[in-house]
Image (cartoon, rainbow, N blue to C red):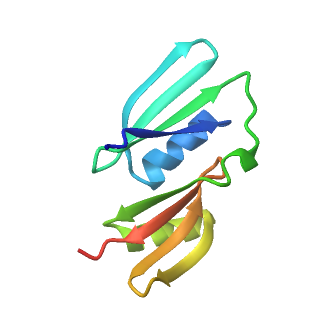
Amino acid sequence: MLINWITIRVNDFEKTKEFYKNFLRMNVENEFSPDEDTSIAFFSSDNETKIEILHNKNEKIDESHNSSVSIGMTAENYDELLNEARERNIIVQEPVLLGGYLLCFFVQDPNGVKIQIIQNNR
């Protein structure tokens, strides 16, 4: 089975786009509005898994709605992302070694979704 995408419902479409595009450096693959109240953008990763952000002007998403979601991402530019996350003040957990081999830190996107940034040890 192949995971095609993960959908995140958001309040601030532009701020969320900035986070996934400029901080996580994901590519905007597609952006459209199926109706006048809804905006959708798809971001692609190196392995082709996508993140879809969905905003509806008539829907207010409580941050706790997304707080139980966590996405793990392996990063070639781990140190660069760590420094930028500290500058942006978005770290929710400083680097930790999990299982004796997995170095990672956690940030939070503008919608309360936790993103685990994992150092690539290839």
Q: Is residue 69 above or below residue 27?
A: below
Count of labels shown? Answer: 0
Q: Position of residue 33 (x, y in %)?
A: 51, 17
Q: Position of residue 103 (x, y in %)?
A: 43, 79
Q: Position of residue 46 (x, y in %)?
A: 28, 50
- Quadrant for the C terminus, please: bottom left
Q: Decide if residue 60 is on the left or right side of residue 109.
A: right
Identify which residue, 33 or 67, lies in the foreground. Answer: 67
The extreme front residue here reads 1
Q: Is residue 89 above or below residue 42?
A: below
**Residue drawn at x 46%, y 66% as measured from the top left:** 117
> Which image quarter: residue 16?
top right
The extreme left residue here reads 122
**Residue drawn at x 42%, y 88% as measured from the top left:** 100
Q: Position of residue 1 (x, y in %)?
A: 31, 44
**Residue drawn at x 47%, y 31% as measured from the top left:** 41
Q: Decide if residue 110 is on the left or right side of residue 24.
A: right
**Residue drawn at x 46%, y 21% as measured from the top left:** 32
